[in-house]
Amino acid sequence: MALELYLDLYSQPCRSVYIFAKKNNIPFDLRRLSLLDGEQYGEEFGKINMIRKAPALRDGDFCLAESIAILLYLAEKFQTPDFWYPADLQQRARVNEYLSWQHMAIRMHGSKMFWLRLLIPKVLGVEVPQDKLDAALEDLNGSLKLIEEKFLQDRPFIAGDHISLADLVAIVEVMQPVGSGLDVFEGRPKLSAWRDRVQDAIGKELFDDAHRTIMGSQEAVKLMDGSKMQVFKPKILRLFL
Amino acid sequence: MELYLDMHSPPCRLVFLFAKAVGIPFEFKHVELSAGQHYSEEFGKISMIRKVPVMKDGSFILTESIAILKYMVQKYSSSVADHWYPADLQQRARVNEYLSWQHMNIRAHASKVFLLRAVFPVIMGSEVPKEKMDAAVEDLNQSLNLLEEKFLENKQFIVGDKISLADIVALIEVMQPLGTGLNVFEGRPKLSAWRERVKKELGEKLFDEAHEVIMKVGSLPEKMQNNSQLEMLRPKFQKLFR
């Protein structure tokens, strides 16, 4: 049985796993999961990942959650080129530092922006107060500033001269608010230049393929049926508002 | 090697405990968070993110406790036993899975409960609204349920028979609300038994030493109240309660 990857490309961590597997020609069966339709709460998926989140991996009878763990597992198992997760002590530390920092920073802030700008008003039908949007934007700007000034500085990529898992995990998160119509690259030439380098290193075709879903969000929400999400409404509102 | 630490902070206790447990020599550099020392110009030169812990190994500066732990394991690989971060593919994946999941779950929820109970009243000048407190405790309980049911299951430790980085990362976070008088172990015999096993592996004396400060956190509000920097710190702390 081939390796299975349970993915929803609306989700940033799913995109990083998708891009990594494809870029490295890792054979896998794509099992599409629709988070907005609540498919992560199905009985079958619960057996694969009781945390009920995506991405999830199933390799024989080994199941694994968490994109960072999945990326590291795939890198090791398929012996991907060194630059993705350098063996060098300090370079590896730089990658690990970013992979750790990003959870409670850009990941949280970019996600929140997407929910506040699109999903909550357009799908759940709840108005988002301006002060909440302003606070979320301030947080997002703070994270983007740290990416530029601390993680990139004057290096082409986070760990140095080559792309690594850090850049991959970073770019998919930075793209999330872009999907909601907020161009975070505007007025940020350093970030834009880095994005271009990352896109080149990944390959534009693969990058665009992975981001097709999120970039189509603004149109897609107009057709979305919010009724399936209503049951999660209290939890979502508590989380983001 | 220098470690910039405030023992009120779980990730600081984490790197302290691991380094001591495996015998990695370091110089303890104290950073008093409640006095806002992390906002000083001096500390800003060490780390512009202005958080702790920070490791300085020669001229190499590294933030993020998880990254620091992995750096220590790799640098001292000849003396750090395999079970801490197993070379076995699947076992290592289990450690990484926990290390990743915990940021937005146990860590976030235990910290929030701690901050609301110990710091909110001093900063905001009022008691925490009941709704807010109840929601935070509910979130923490859900995370603790997952820790017991998904990560521990019926095993001795998160990965299996032996302690790993995952267990220390977990326990130091779970300990955080304890000093505020919230006994998260009450009614959780599985969690309590695991806690005892982890303490034993690390060394009970060492574990208690690391947690001395957080267990005496009742004196924190008074310390903060008397701090001349309080007005400057107030808006920064307020952000934590959003």
Image: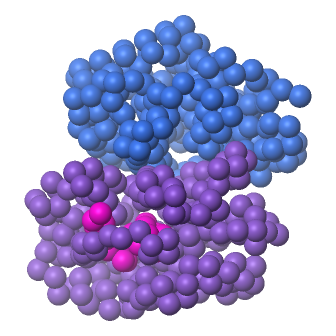
Query: B102 or A174, which is in the foreground?
Result: B102
Q: How is the image coloured?
A: by chain
- Residue shown at the point (12%, 61%) measured from the top left: B42
Residue at 72% x, 39% y is A56
Name the residue: 50% across, 11% down: A203
Q: Is residue B47 visible?
A: no
Q: Tell me if A53 is positioned left or right of B226 in this view.
A: right
* Tint of chain A: blue
State left or right for residue B194 relative to residue B155.
left
> Can residue B112 be spotted in the picture?
yes
The colour one sees for chain B in the rendered image is purple
In this picture, which residue range is highlighted in magenta?
Answer: B1-19
Q: Where residue A228 sits in the image (x, y, percent)?
A: 74, 38
Q: Nearer the viewer, residue B233 or A77?
A: A77
User: Which quadrant holds the N terminus of chain A?
Assistant: top right
Q: Nearer the viewer, residue B214 or B221?
A: B214
Q: Work out whether A96 lies above or below B7.
A: above
Which residue is painted at 62% across and 20% down in the image? Answer: A24
